[in-house]
Image (cartoon, rainbow, N blue to C red):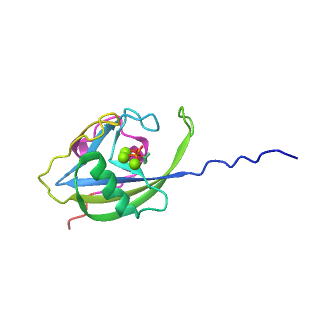
Amino acid sequence: NGISMVEAPAPKVGVAVFLLRGKTVLLGRRRSTGVGDTKFSLPSGHLEFGLESFEECAARELKEETGLDIEKIEFLTVTNNLFLNEVKPSHYVAIFLRAYSRDSLQEPENLEPTKCDGWDWYERDNLPKPLFLPVQKMVKDGLNPFPIID
Ligand SMILES: CC(C)CCOP(=O)(O)OP(=O)(O)O
Ligand SMILES: [Mg+2]
Ligand SMILES: [Mg+2]
Ligand SMILES: [Mg+2]
């Protein structure tokens, strides 16, 4: 019948990192033609096809975006994020990890100024606004990325 069955696009996988330093976490205001433009978000990036583990993706994206080398990378949670009302509709499964900078005194650099306005450290109870939706949802749901030091 010649009707072309165009495949629906598959959801993409994003990896986002809560990079912790003392009581603070690294956030930057996104500049994106994709999702989350002008929103404050964690350093994050696309999991590249067939190449890397979640941890390897996190370390690569952190190095690309901030120049920092990270360690003690741990899985935190995963969320399903629909951005169907955006200019370019998208659907991301977001893998959230926690990590620390190998050199805790090293400051992040803004290596992709067209995609981020700059990085800064924020206390959990004093996060900047507006937060990128997946991060906002997590904070609202009460996820605490900081280790519980009993
Ligand atoms: C939306 C997000 C969870 C995944 C995509 O992140 P990103 O747009 O920062 O992607 P890149 O850093 O790979 O360009
Ligand atoms: Mg990136
Ligand atoms: Mg990338
Ligand atoms: Mg990114």
- Coordinates of residue 144 in the picture (x, y in percent): 31, 56
Image quarter for ligand 4: top left
- Coordinates of residue 110 in the picture (x, y in percent): 24, 40
Give the quadrant of residue 76: bottom left
* Residue at 32% in and 55% down: 60
Whether residue 144 can be seen here: no
* Residue 72 on the magenta segment: no
Q: Residue furthest left?
A: 105
Whether residue 12 can be seen here: yes
Give the quadrant of residue 120: top left
Q: In the picture provided, is 21 more to the left or to the right than 12?
A: left
Query: Relative to the observer, which residue lies in front, 133 or 62?
Result: 62
- Coordinates of residue 37 in the picture (x, y in percent): 41, 34
Query: Relative to the observer, which residue lies in front, 119 or 1?
Result: 1
Q: In the picture provided, is 88 more to the left or to the right than 55?
A: right
Q: Residue furthest bottom?
A: 150
Q: How many marks?
A: 0
* Residue 131 on the magenta segment: yes
State the extent of the magenta-drawn residues as a range: 120-145
The image shows residue 69, relative to residue 90, as above or below, that is below
* Residue at 29% in and 46% down: 65
Classify the position of the C terminus by image quarter: bottom left
The image shows residue 145, relative to residue 66, as above or below, that is below
- Coordinates of residue 6 in the picture (x, y in percent): 71, 46
Query: Relative to the observer, which residue lies in front, 63 or 11?
Result: 63
